[in-house]
Image (cartoon, rainbow, N blue to C red):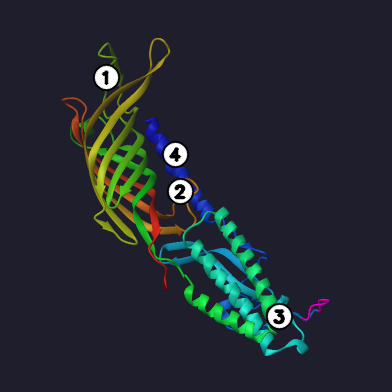
Amino acid sequence: MKSFILVILIAVLGPSSLIAQRKSGKTYGRKAPVELSGERYKKWDDGELLWSDFRDTTSIKGVNSILKTDLWVEMEKRKSGNTRIYIPRAFAYIDRDRSNIKDAEKTQDLLRFYQAQFDLLELYRRKLQEELNEGMSELEMENAFRHYSQLYDEQLKNMTIETEKGENKRKLEEWEIYLVKQLRIHPDPGIPVIVPKSFGYGLNLGVGTAFPTGEISKFFTPAFQFNLGLDLAYKRAHLLLDMAIGGAKNRSDMDIVYQKGTHTTTWEKGRGTNYSQFSFALGYGVLNTKYFALTPFVGGVFSEYSKLLDNDNDKRINVYMNDFNLLAGLNFDYKFSSLVSFVPSAWFGHREMTTSSLRTRLYVSYGKYDMYMKGVQVGFSVSYSGFVRLIKINNFVGR
């Protein structure tokens, strides 16, 4: 039992830490834009540069013109139905309000040079996005951002020197041709296609009740229980480990023998009795859509009616009746939310899709506590189910 509880705790802490990491919204950039989609900022795919994009009217001593460019990485959320996707997205943009040009400096060659500068930034943005799409930790994302920012700064310095800031037309044309080729080689990666892997794991927590039938119902009322379960999956196959703890009441007086027949106690009518279950079962997902899942299962269940009593030495002892028998049932999941993140798990280092569901569980189990007390117990529970499926990137859109 202790091992089972330990596994449950690991399952709880793993997904919860991942969700917190996904929602952190950490961004990278040399100066954080207030709103990148606003009028102040122009992204590369918003169109070619125009002199009207240079809006700064302040005069910087010794600087007749300047184009303020930068990279920006943020955790972007995309939603499709009940599925949310968190993916780090890189942007190349200019800051119109910090880009300056004097009227006397406005030439077509200078505008071409600034466009080449913007194209160079877009090239490194795409290379950065290619790596981001493969899935990175926050530290790896920050290192990749710094790496490509540094490469851009170095190449921009080389381009500025070689083209003499656009005045050397032959060199400027060479850079333009080079950038056109490189942008064709590195098209915008877009959003990768997500493909679920075979392995998954999940946790469910809820409440339920078990109704005794047959001879058992003459001695015990239905039991109210708290349920805790673990779901380990490979493709459509599921190993289900479930534990339920609760209580029932006695319908009649019962004489219970314990300590190998040396002692007897009476469970009085109307008094409370503990009722617990531990089951393991194999299930198979016969239905698994975007919103619903249906999983029948069969297995075994250990069930126990018990009470703690004080003995003559003031030590509490457990008096019980238990049984191990067959179990069969059906899980029905209504999936109300799915979350996909490209940030790898902090615990295991893989990318995952976490699905939250409302799970209803119906089952029947056979119980035989002695030759006279036997029957079928019908159970029903409602719980929250958090299921994590590992994912991989199949290919890139547009590739």
Tag of residue 44: none
| Residue 319 shown left or right of residue 352 in the figure | left
- The quarter of the picture where residue 317 lies is top left
Q: Residue at x 67, y 87 (%)?
A: 109
Estimate the spatial distance between the alpha carbons at disc 2 and disc 4, rounded to whole Å: 11 Å
Across and down, in percent, residue 210 comes to 29, 39
- Amino acid type of the residue that numbered disc 1 sits on in the rendered structure: Ile
Number of other residues with Cα within 10 Å of mark 3, as a class: few under 14, some 14 to 19, many 20 or more: some
| Residue 154 shown left or right of residue 284 in the figure | right
Is residue 34 visible in the rendered structure shown here?
A: no
Helix, strand or loop at disc 4?
A: helix
Q: Mark 3 sits on what residue?
A: 164
- The quarter of the picture where residue 9 lies is top left
| Nearer mark to the viewer, of 3 and 1 | 3
Estimate the spatial distance between the alpha carbons at disc 3 and disc 2, rounded to whole Å: 54 Å
- The quarter of the picture where residue 95 lies is bottom right
Q: Mark 1 sits on what residue?
A: 256
Q: Mark 4 sits on what residue?
A: 9
Q: Residue at x 59, y 57 (%)?
A: 143
- Amino acid type of the residue that numbered disc 2 sits on in the rendered structure: Pro
Estimate the spatial distance between the alpha carbons at disc 4 and disc 3, rounded to whole Å: 63 Å
Estimate the spatial distance between the alpha carbons at disc 1 and disc 2, rounded to whole Å: 44 Å
Across and down, in percent, residue 40 comes to 66, 77
Of mark 3 and mark 2, the one earlier in the sequence is: 2
Main SS of residues in magenta:
loop
Circles 2 and 4, Cβ within 8 Å, touching? The answer is: no
Across and down, in percent, residue 273 comes to 33, 28
| Nearer mark to the viewer, of 3 and 2 | 3
Q: Which residues are magenta?
A: 59-64
Helix, strand or loop at disc 1?
A: strand
- Amino acid type of the residue that numbered disc 3 sits on in the rendered structure: Glu
